[in-house]
Amino acid sequence: MARFVAPDQVASIHVILNDIDEAGLAAKIEPILQYYGPLRPKVRILKGEEVLLGEGHTARRPLKDRILIEDRYRLPLIRKGGWRGNNGYRMQQVLKLGAARVAEAESIVILDTKNLFLRSFEEGEFFSPQGPARIQFMPVQSDYHRNWLLQSLEALGVEHPLTDDLRTTTFSTPFPVRRTLVLSLLDEINTRYGSVQALFASKRRPSEFMLMNAFCLMSRDGYAPWFEPADPAHIGMWPTYSTDELAKLVARLQDDRSLTLGLHNRAVANLPEDLRGQVYAALETRGICDRQVTEEVLQQTSALSS
């Protein structure tokens, strides 16, 4: 971001902690902040409670929720590694939604730590001049996509037929979205469940991005006020991909139109040596990091998978 994002393109950058040991994680992140360079004054590290438990962030907090969600870290047999002892995978979805509460601009881009910018960009690549977020749309084909959407529609009480021609937004980061949409979604969730963390701690299995889609589908205006289709500019490497699929994605690193790379640590572990070498070389060519450092970092990242 320091290399490719100009300070005048950004209102604020929020790094949100999702760990049972927030203080320990914050201490590890603090030394990294200097590398944001000219963006450093825009960056804030936030605890989960700052986006989930602030004034007006919940409609109700039953004792059960406070014990099993907010104080789960006190329960040795069921605590996990995420925020306040909750499941980290579920909580990162909650925190992405909650982040809209602290954003300082209407236009938000949600990022994971695995997302790397590959070049500079214009605002119009993420948002149209009229306001809607520009994002890739896709048909509902995979079982997990269909299940996330069905669960999200059900969670919001939306009756909508999943026809063959239905296309939703993608469900990976970077994910551009208007703040107003997410805040309206959070208000709807609070009315129904008391808080967004209560919804995700229940037996329901929506996803953060399909909840946004479900919210659009419950409106007569549909997607038009919030999203418009865009050509794919983001590369995402996932551990479920075959070597052939990964090879095609690595080849896209040579395309100047590619804007970001999402590099899952388990996908790095799955890359054959020749493809890893191409990734190292491409990141060096793009001016992100010299090959030696890239190789050392990604090898350590890959080791996290074992």
Image (cartoon, rainbow, N blue to C red):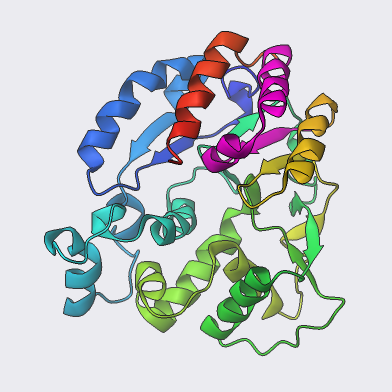
Total label count?
0
The answer to whether residue 265 is magenta is: yes
Asked if one can make out residue 119 in the rendered structure from this viewpoint, the answer is no
Question: In which quadrant of the rendered view does residue 141 lie?
Answer: bottom right
Asked if 64 appears above or below 246 in the picture, the reply is below
Residue visible at 82% across and 39% down in the picture: 248
**Segment colored magenta:** 258-286
Give percent across and percent down for residue 199. 40, 75
The answer to whether residue 304 is magenta is: no
- Examine the residues drawn in magenta and state their main secondary structure: helix
In this picture, residue 71 sits left or right of residue 228:
left
In this picture, residue 153 sits left or right of residue 204:
right
In this picture, residue 263 sits left or right of residue 104:
right
In this picture, residue 45 sits left or right of residue 261:
left
Residue visible at 71% across and 69% down in the picture: 142
| Quadrant that contains the C terminus | top left
Question: In which quadrant of the rendered view does residue 45 lie?
Answer: top left
Q: Nearer the viewer, residue 71 or 270?
A: 270
Residue visible at 86% across and 47% down in the picture: 231
